[in-house]
Image (spheres, helix red, strand yellow):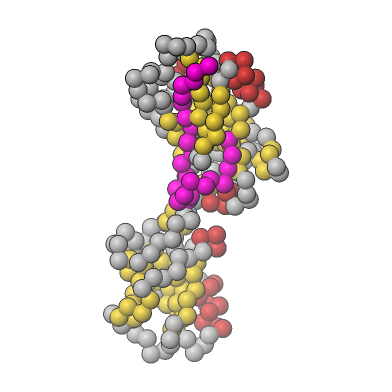
Amino acid sequence: MNYKEFFQIAINHPYFSDNQMELVVIPEASTLKFLRKQQFVVKNTAKGLKILVPVDSEGDRLPVLKLGDALSFDVFPTTGSFGEVTDTSMADSGNILLFTNEQLENDSEKLTVSEITGDQILNGYAAIAKIKIGLHKVNFDLDKQPPLYQVVFKPKLVKWKYYILSNTETTKLEIKDRSEQLTFTELKNQEEASDKIANSLMLNFPKKQVFVFESTIAINYSNKILKNIQLLKNDHIIIKHLSNPDIRNKGIQIIKIN
């Protein structure tokens, strides 16, 4: 039997800079039953899956689909850290995200997102999303590329904050991004007054000055290291590549210099 690709589902999450997603896409039981009956084939990919359909010798689709036929999949994390880096705030407590092609224009492939009740568990992890593909919306045309449906998760955002301990002779510190994509502002004394971390550092290091810098915008959680963020002391570069703040610790990084 010959097969042609019907469509593909790919997960897009800005946190992950490589193809290894900390999640798995699993067909629901009713979908598995439908797939077997129609002789569809599921092929897993690095970022999701492909659905293949049987075709005749002319390349025409053999299965007869009815209006209302749909495939549903649950998305499960494979580690506990996935939820720590993903923004699911649009779903109410107890609900999960729903990605579907039902409201898409025919040429659009970024699935729309809403919310739905979900309580499925896999290997101890609760489903974080559901994907529903209405088959009547899938354009099966041998002259065109099969649809590549994008499931786009939003990463959490956090402002980066550097606390720099320096000697009392330091008069000027700056943080600059050589790529000029990010800017950092020094927080002055009046802003530090209510900063518990700055106050704690000043108490524990009374012979040091505490400089505090914060990014002007919130930055995506990402496992890709941002380089070329430089620390300048009195207009001289003393650190060419500042380490990225720990985003799981609210984007805070403490650095000691001479």
Question: What residue do we see at 51% from left, 41% from top?
Answer: 46
Report the span colored magenta.
Answer: 1-25
Which residue is located at x 47 percent, y 80 percent? 256
Using the image, determine if residue 226 lies above or below residue 155: below
Question: Which quadrant would the C terminus be assigned to in this image?
Answer: bottom left
Q: Is residue 209 above or below residue 53?
A: below
Q: Quadrant of residue 224?
A: bottom left
Residue 186 placed where, x, y %? 37, 72
Q: Is residue 40 magenta?
A: no
Q: Is residue 1 left or right of residue 178?
A: right
Res 226 → quadrant: bottom left
For the question of whether residue 37 can be seen, the reply is: yes
The picture places residue 107, in percent across and down from the top left corner, at: 35, 25
Vertically, is 82 above or below 73?
below
- For the residue pair 209 and 82, the one nearer the viewer reads as 82
Residue 41 lies in what quarter of the image?
Answer: top right
Compared to residue 134, the image places residue 233 above or below, namely below
Residue at x-position 47% and y-position 36%: 10
How many numbered marks, from 0 up? 0
In this view, the residue in front, 82 or 193, is 82
36 horizontally vs 100: left or right: right
Query: Observer-nearest residue: 91 or 63?
Result: 63
